[in-house]
C-alpha cells in the first residue's frame, strides 16, 4: 500500500497534514471553521459547521474525492445543547445514504473552536 500526503496551497505551518491517502482510503485531519475564507471570525455552531464542511470539500477535492466518498465522520462538539444546530447544517451537506458518524462532546484545543470534524473517505486510487 502506498501513502500519499495531500497538500493544500494555503495550509498553515501545522505539524500535521490536511489529509493522507493510504491505498483507497483518505484520512482527513480534524477540520475547524473558526474563520471563513475572507478571515471573518465565525462564532456560532451553524457558521462553524458550514465552514468545516467547506474546508472538508476543499481537502477532498485535492485528493480527487468529494463528500459523497465519505464513509466515516467524527464530530467533536463543545456543547451538547448545540447538537441540533450542528445536525441541521450537517444535513445540508450530507445526503442519504449517510456515512457512519460519531459525535463526541468535550473541549477543543483552541479558544473559539466550537466543533471539529474529522473524516475518512473511500475512493479507489487513480
Image (tube, rainbow, N blue to C red):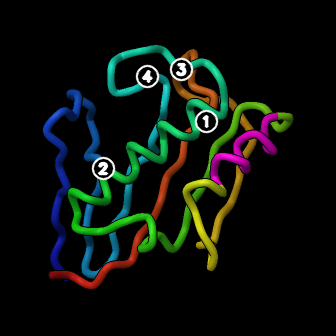
Q: Are marks 3 and 1 in contact (CB under 8 Å)?
A: no
User: Upstream in the sequence, badge 2 or badge 3?
Assistant: 3
- Please tell me whether mark 3 sits on a helix, a strand or a loop: loop
User: Which residue is denoted by mark 1 in the rendering?
Assistant: 115
Quadrant in the picture for the C terminus: bottom left
Q: Earlier in the sequence, mark 3 or mark 1?
A: 3
Label 1 or label 4, whichever comes before in sequence order: 4
Would you call the spot at circle 4 few (<14 residues within 10 Å), some (14-19), or many (20 or more)?
Answer: some
Point 17% across, 57% down: residue: 5
Residue 77's x, y, as percent? 69, 39
Is 81 on the left or on the right of 29, as rendered?
Answer: right
- Rounded to the nearest whole Å, what is the CA distance between mark 3 and mark 1? 11 Å
Span highlighted in magenta in the image? 82-90
Residue at which label 4 appears:
35
Kindly report the secondary structure that dominates the magenta region of the rendered protein.
helix
- Above or below: residue 43 compared with residue 69: above
How far, Cα to Cα, is label 1 from label 4? 12 Å
Residue pointed to by mark 2: 58
Crowding at dot 3, Cα within 10 Å, few <14 / some 14-19 / many 20+, comes out as: some
Q: CA distance from mark 4 to mark 3?
A: 5 Å
3 or 1: mark nearer the eye: 3
| Residue at x-position 40% and y-position 50% | 56
In this rendering, would 80 be left or right of 70? right
Of the residues under marks 2 and 1, which one precedes in the sequence?
2
Q: Tell me which residue sits at (81%, 44%) in the image.
A: 84
N-terminal-most mark, 4 or 3: 4
| Mark linked to residue 60 | none
Please provide percent x and percent y for residue 79.
78, 32
Q: Report which residue position mark 3 lands on.
A: 42
In front of the other: 76 or 9? 9
Residues under numbered marks 4 and 3 in contact, where contact means CB atoms less than 8 Å apart: yes
Q: CA distance from mark 2 to mark 1?
A: 18 Å
Amino acid at each position: 500500500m502506498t501513502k500519499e500526503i495531500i497538500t493544500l496551497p494555503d495550509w498553515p505551518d501545522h505539524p500535521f497534514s490536511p489529509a493522507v491517502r493510504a491505498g483507497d482510503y483518505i484520512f482527513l485531519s480534524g477540520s475547524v471553521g473558526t474563520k471563513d475564507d475572507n478571515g471573518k471570525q465565525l462564532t456560532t455552531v451553524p457558521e462553524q459547521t458550514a465552514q468545516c464542511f467547506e474546508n472538508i470539500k476543499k481537502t477532498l477535492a485535492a485528493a480527487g474525492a468529494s463528500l459523497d466518498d465519505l464513509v466515516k465522520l467524527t464530530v467533536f462538539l463543545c456543547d451538547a445543547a448545540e447538537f441540533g444546530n450542528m445536525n441541521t447544517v450537517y444535513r445540508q451537506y450530507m445526503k442519504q445514504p449517510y456515512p457512519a458518524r460519531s459525535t463526541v462532546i468535550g473541549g477543543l484545543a483552541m479558544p473559539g473552536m466550537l466543533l471539529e470534524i474529522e473524516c475518512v473517505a473511500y475512493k479507489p486510487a487513480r
